[in-house]
Image (cartoon, rainbow, N blue to C red):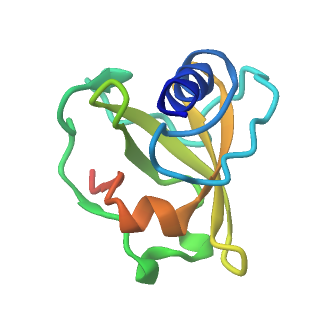
Amino acid sequence: AAAAAAAAGEAGRDGGGAAADGVQAANHALPAQGVNFINPPPPGLKPSKAQPQAPGKMLTSKDISPNLKGRHAELFWPADGNWYLIEIQDVDVVTKTARIVYTTGELEELELGDIIQNQHMSLISL
């Protein structure tokens, strides 16, 4: 099961499969569409790093609101230990899900409850 989860995690980041491996999110794979960020990312940030690159705060339940749309964040992938730069494209406050886009243009839908519980998203404060 762990190998399958790792493979699914790799597919999500690199090829349109599941979301942050080990996060146990619903992570409905959306077709890779080459989606652009709504807002340009903060300058100087790389697509991924071993540690969060920008000042920020961990996502909490109180943060789940329509105001997250367009926010940049870093999403942790336990399988490879990296934090990936993302933008939140849309939020459903009722289901506590968010559609995100990676710098690669790949879309993904995350269950934010799992992300919050595991502290796998840092909202960028820049």
Q: Point out the residue furthest to the front here.
A: 1
Q: In this orientation, does residue 68 appear?
A: no
Q: Is residue 104 above or below residue 72?
A: above
Residue 65 vertical placement versus 7 (above, below): below
Q: Residue at x 37, y 29 (%)?
A: 79
Q: x and y percent of residue 75 in the render?
A: 40, 43
User: Residue 122, can we see it?
Assistant: yes
Residue drawn at 75 percent across, 36 percent down = 29
> In the drawing, does residue 9 fall left or right of residue 125?
right
Q: How many marks?
A: 0
Quarter containing the N terminus: top right
Q: Is residue 65 above or below residue 54?
A: below
Q: Nearer the viewer, residue 49 or 28?
A: 28
Q: What residue is drawn where x is 25% and y is 25%?
A: 49
* Residue located 27% across and 30% down the image: 81
In the picture shown, does residue 74 fall above or below 34?
below
In this view, the residue in front, 57 or 9, is: 9
State left or right for residue 4 relative to residue 29: left
| Rendering coords of residue 94 (x, y %) | 72, 81
Picture coordinates of residue 40, whole percent (x, y): 48, 34
Q: Nearer the viewer, residue 25 or 93?
A: 25
42 left or right, relative to 67: left
Q: Quadrant of residue 61?
A: bottom left
Depth check, front residue: 120 or 24: 24
Query: x, y (%) of residue 23?
Result: 47, 50
